[in-house]
Amino acid sequence: MRILPELALSTFQVFIQILGGRQLGRKERGVKMANKLINDMGLPKSISNIFTARNIITAKDALSHTDFELMELLDVGMTEVTSAISHISEVVSPPAQSALLLMEQRVRNESLAGHLPTRLKGLDDALCGGIPFGVLTELVGPAGIGKTQFCLKLSLLASLPTDFGGLDGHVIYIDVESKFSSKRLIEIGMKSFPEIFHKKGMAQEMAGRILILRPTSLSEFAESLHQIKVSLFQQQVKLLIIDSMAALVLGENDNGAPRQRALGCHISFIKSLAEFSRIPIVVTNQVRSQISDEPLMYSFQAPNHSRKKDNHATYDSHLVAALGINWAHAVTIRLVLEARSGKRFIKLAKSPISPPLAFPFNITSSGVVLLDDDGIEMKGPEINTIHCQGLLLLFLAVRSEDYVLSE
């Protein structure tokens, strides 16, 4: 069987990719193998010289012709052509791999890639160590639920010395809505890490490792990102936080397609920044009200027929993450922060390595604290439905038309 190497992909690889596995560099490897010289493939000298004489130099050159075309070009018999092409295909085509082997490779790569522990045991266990490096992690929830509190704690954890479980680096915090509080940051540090923050000058040193940027538009944001890419390695940046992406998009005057294109460009750049820098990138998102006839995000979610229209008592069940489906596909980890019956929950709504889980939590002087490390598994619409029962800011969710981007 003849397979062009840049198109070769085993069934098991497709299977794993659908499940969320990423075959990094597959295209690059395919191109490299396609350009492999025929003279370096171990063919008999007599046949390889004929290929060279007919200007068929690489594997791609040979595999782009039919057997009959090669017979005519090389002026050799079908047996010689079939034998040569079989040998070339075997050399350049990737070997078939089992689903088990690919899964083991992914787990091994995840552990080598690194994580930023959140110090929330149940969540860290579910994420195999914490917030992963090299991908986008999203925090989504209504105003006042605790997204910024979560980000402040992560900032401290990234800046802590490695002896105390931190990353001993700098943090870039893009504070779009001016919610960053140095006072609150120091309070969380004093309560969570008293052995560090009670030392003379340590509070100022830790806070000094966090650089705050406050862009007022998407264009300023884009300029900041390009500057960040240059300084990531020079400044030993170990965490990038964008709080919040939705506020930036909502602040633009353009609607519909222009806004979608702008968001799409930024999504691509942020993802490439994560992969280039191999650091965790955490982005907060807001919520919006769900349109009654809006399709569900995933096909496996059964519709919730129990929702009542125009009933403020059940309004919370109409809330979904803002920014649309393209954004949802761009993030690797989605953490939903919500409130039900006066209790707050962190839901691990999207992860390639964990089932959807919900953890009850409180916000204390030391930041976000889990009340139970045993997550509650979720199914169906509950995975992406966002509740905010019992919050005073219940009706501050943005209007649907502000955030529905044409797909």
Image (cartoon, rainbow, N blue to C red):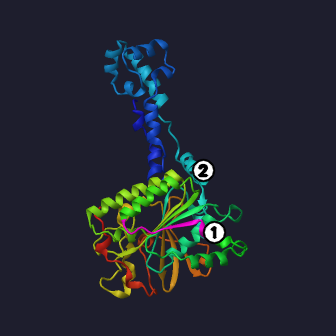
**Mark 2 and mark 1 in contact (Cβ < 8 Å)?**
no
**Residue 83: quarter of image:** top left
Q: CA distance from mark 1 to mark 2?
A: 32 Å
Task: Give coordinates of residue 219: x percent, y percent.
Answer: 36, 62
| Residues in magenta, as a range | 205-217
* Circle 2 crowding by C-alpha within 10 Å: few under 14, some 14–19, many from 20: few
Q: Amino acid at mark 2?
A: Arg
Q: Which residue is mark 2?
A: 108
Image quadrant for the N terminus?
top left
Residue 188: in magenta span: no
Q: Which residue is mark 1?
A: 206
Under tag 2, what secondary structure?
helix
Residue 213: in magenta span: yes
* Circle 1 crowding by C-alpha within 10 Å: few under 14, some 14–19, many from 20: many
Task: Give coordinates of residue 90: x percent, y percent.
Answer: 48, 29
Q: Is residue 376 visible?
A: no
Circle 1 or circle 2, nearest the eye: 1
Measured along the vertical axis of the image, is residue 44 above or below residue 187?
Answer: above
**Of 369 and 198, which appears nearest the observer?**
198
Which residue shows up at 46% across the image and 33% down it?
32
What is the total number of numbered labels drawn onto the structure image? 2
Image quadrant for the C terminus?
bottom left
